[in-house]
Amino acid sequence: MIAIVTDSTVGYSSAELAARGIVSTVPVNYQIGSETFEENASDRNGVFLPRMVGKPCKTAQPALGNFIRTFQSLTEKGCDVICIVLSAALSGTYSSACFAAQQVGGNIRVIDSETIGAGMHLLVDEAVNMVKGGLAFDDVVRHLENLKKKIAVVFSVESLDRLIAGGRLVSGKANTSLNLRPVFVLKGRIVFKGNARGQRERLEKMCALLPENTRRMFVCRCGAETNVDEFTALLKARFPAVNIHQRVVGPVLSIHVGAGAFGVAYVVNG
């Protein structure tokens, strides 16, 4: 049997994990002020944004012991394990999972998703479908390595403070002064795509970055973002045949993008 392991930034709810059956999540750690937490399934994190206001916040990769215990539990049951984790360019989670796999032994393959959050959700869903469809272990891994190149996230933030504080901002041209807001693409790493003036220009610029052959997408928001419904409507007008899901990001991603951030994760055909 093939089991899928991922990290908590994937954003699954408890019900979604139960429905997939073969997926286990390892919690990513985060800190608000002096308090330390483990990120849970999306319906079990409580109200976290208000607690972040005015407090220093940071994240840390999952505890090595959590990966080891998860891998050991699955290999002892006779499972082969495919572990899909957030981008190695943004976190040490991939290195931690690789080290844990070496310690445990067995048939464990760790995949750098080169994405995060809803982008990982898309990739893990595909992995589940392939496993349930009966594909062999090596075939699933090969397909995932190809598929991850077809997944990206387009997003924008209200403030650059969180990205700068977390060391994730790679361009000094991004601007949130006056009526400007930056637009980014995450594909392995965060790439600045330009500043937009005003809400409509920002939404149109983000929408235009999606390829014509997009086949599935998740619109995500951090908190009560008021642009999301209009953004979803723009995407639906351009991609009428694509089913668009809406999601609220968890505490780990919220620490890095800040309240008011929103975006879309997508996967393309081909």
Image: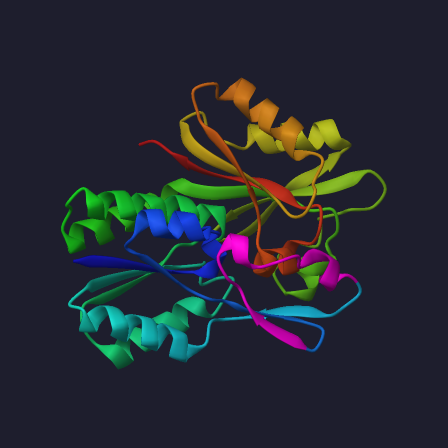
Image point (31%, 32%), residue name = 270
Horizontally, residue 1 falls left or right of residue 238, namely left
Q: Nearer the viewer, residue 251 or 197?
A: 251
> Is residue 118 covered in magenta?
no
Horizontally, residue 101 falls left or right of residue 176, namely left
Look at the picture and state if 249 lies above or below 93.
above
Q: Nearer the viewer, residue 44 or 260?
A: 44
Any part of residue 134 in sight: yes
Check the image and name the residue furthest to the right.
Answer: 178
Residue 82, percent from left and from top:
27, 60
> Is residue 49 covered in magenta?
yes
Image-quadrant location for residue 105: bottom left
Look at the picture and state if 200 lies above or below 185.
above
Image point (47%, 60%), residue name = 8
Q: How is the image coloured?
A: rainbow
Image-quadrant location for residue 267: top left
Image-quadrant location for residue 215: top left
Image point (80%, 65%), residue name = 54
Image point (25%, 59%), residue name = 3
Q: How many marks?
A: 0
Residue 176, percent from left and from top:
78, 46
Residue 155, percent from left and from top:
60, 43
Horizontally, residue 20 falls left or right of residue 205, namely left
Q: Which residues are magenta?
A: 35-53
Any part of residue 146 in sight: no
Which image quarter is the N terminus in?
A: bottom left
Horizontally, residue 111 falls left or right of residue 88, namely left
Look at the picture and state if 181 lies above or below 41.
above
Q: Nearer the viewer, residue 109 or 76?
A: 76
Q: Nearer the viewer, residue 108 or 174?
A: 108
